[in-house]
Structure formats: C-alpha cells, structure tokens
Amino acid sequence: MKKINLTTSIYEYYSCKEFSAEEQELIKKCKEAVKYSYAPYSKFNVGAAVLLANGEIISGSNQENVAYPSGLCAERVAIFYANSKFPDIPVKSIAITAFTRNKYIENPVPPCGACRQVIIETETRFKTAIKIILVSRNKITVIEDAKILLPLNFNKNSL
C-alpha cells in the first residue's frame, strides 16, 4: 500500500483593488452577468465571466429549466460561448459570483463538479492553467489551477 497526499493552496483577498485592472474588469463583468440569470426555481443566480488571452471578456449566467438536468451553469455557458466564438484563443481566467435573497453571497461558492471538469478540459485543450476567481460579498478566493479543485479528474488517459 502507498499513501498519496494531495495538498491545496488557495488565496483570499478582501478587495478588488488587489487585482490588475484587467481582472477588476473581469470581476465587474461576472457581477453584471448575474442580472441575466434565469433561476426561477432555485433563486440562486450565478454569473461568470472568462478572460481570454486576446483580452476579450465573455460572460454567462445560469439558465434553469423546470427539468433540472436541462439547465446549464453560468461557468459552462461562458466557457462554451467563448470556445465557440474564439475556438483558438485560450482562457486565462474565470470569475464567478452568485446572488440570492437580494444580495451577493456572503462567501465564495466554487464551481460544481461538471463545471470543474469543463474548466479542466479547457485547460487541457489549450495547455494552460485557468485562474479561478470566486467573488462574494466578503472576500474573493483565487485558485490558480482547476486541477486543485478536482485532483482526480477524468481525462483522456481515463479512456
């Protein structure tokens, strides 16, 4: 038997001013994206924005459906749209926030498992890590690489 230890490092910030102007704009865009969320069932509105290597910012919001599996998370909406509009441009970072009960969430919420897998696939596709910026009312959490969130991910070697 062999024991394998996995370690995780995340960074916490308490002001947008600690980020570059480009990342501050990304954070602003994810907050704006929340307004376009369609979440009549959960009332949990999520906005995401991806920053591409060419400087473009693409936003997305969660889109629910009464048949829950038919909906789509904000992260995947933004990434899939970015990949379809700019198929050869890597994603540098993604900012994500949520709004519920008439206010932004108190603490950052990470992407679901399906979104983590899609972010990892995008990292693999472009051979570059994607910075994940989780935005809440009280703080901003940064993860430097999606594999930190899903260390035992499904990949081409799993096939």
Image (tube, grey):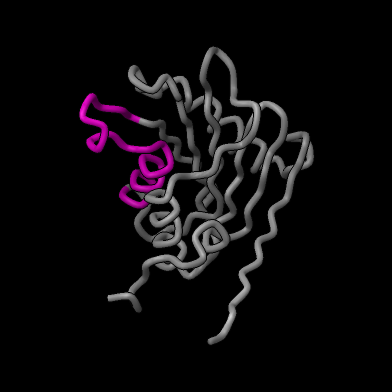
Give the magenta part as a residue range: 63-84
Q: Is residue 88 left or right of residue 127?
A: left
Residue in the image at 61% along x and 44% along y? 133
Residue in the image at 45% along x and 53% along y? 116
Residue in the image at 61% along x and 35% along y? 27
* 29 versus 95 height, above or below: above
Q: Nearer the viewer, residue 61 or 101?
A: 101
Percent x, y for residue 89? 43, 58
Residue 145, located in which quarter of the rendered image? bottom right
Percent x, y for residue 139? 71, 34
Of helix, strand and loop, which mostly describes the magenta segment? helix
Percent x, y for residue 131? 59, 54
Q: Please state, as top left, top right, bottom left or bottom right, where the C terminus lies in the image.
A: bottom left
Percent x, y for residue 32? 52, 25
Q: Is residue 74 magenta?
A: yes
Answer yes or no: is residue 56 visible: no
Q: Nearer the viewer, residue 29 or 76?
A: 76
Q: Nearer the viewer, residue 41 or 127?
A: 41
* 40 versus 88 height, above or below: above
